[in-house]
Amino acid sequence: MSDTAERLWGVIEPYVAAEGIELDDLEVLGHGAGTIVRVTVDGDETLSVDRIAELSRGISRLLDDDDPVSGSYTLEVSSPGLERRLRRPRHYEKSLGREVKVKTKGPVAGSVNHAGELLEADDDGFVVGTEAGAHRIAYADVASARTVFVWEKAAKPGTGH
């Protein structure tokens, strides 16, 4: 995490925690006038658009007062959504039992693509149960990872199937 992102985390996290919300992720992308501060918040219940807008206004006021980002920037505040990127150990822990797709930097168990159920997660890595078996992957080996929303096929109306 960059120095700017760490400073922002220190400013934003206490505010959202006081609001009963978890600061799930924070990224600072770009530089200069094109800087984007992307804040992801999560709660025990689904966050409404109005609640996210309220949090965004509060975060914006905090950043205006503290000014941890030099120059102009765009603030984006959102929730993780149905399919979420997995970037921190906490993301994996919160996603246990869900379907995931993981791309590794090099082959793990003979492949760089791994899809299956997220079975375990700890401070060092996680286990994905794939069709070829369970594979342990270290966080350091991950190029990208996300949860996959599985659409359940609904019964046809009037048939019960």
Image (cartoon, rainbow, N blue to C red):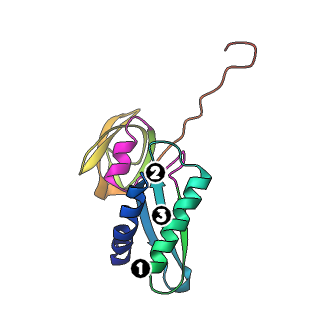
Q: Which residue is mark 3?
A: 39
Q: Residue at x 30, y 44 (%)?
A: 126
Q: Residue at x 36, y 62 (%)?
A: 14
Q: Which residue is mark 2?
A: 42
Q: Amino acid at mark 2?
A: Asp
Q: Amino acid at mark 1?
A: Asp
Where residue 23 sits in the image (x, y, percent)?
41, 58
Left or right of residue 107: residue 85: right
Q: Earlier in the sequence, mark 2 or mark 1?
A: 2
Give the answer, above or below, for where 108 lies relative to 161. Answer: below
Q: Residue at x 52, y 47 (%)?
A: 83
Numbered label tally:
3
**Label 1: which secondary element:** helix
Q: Which residue is mark 1?
A: 66
Q: Quick one: 91 or 112, which is closer to the camera?
A: 91
- Per the image, is 85 magenta? yes
Q: Are marks 1 and 3 in contact (CB under 8 Å)?
A: no
The stretch of residues the image draws in magenta is 79-98
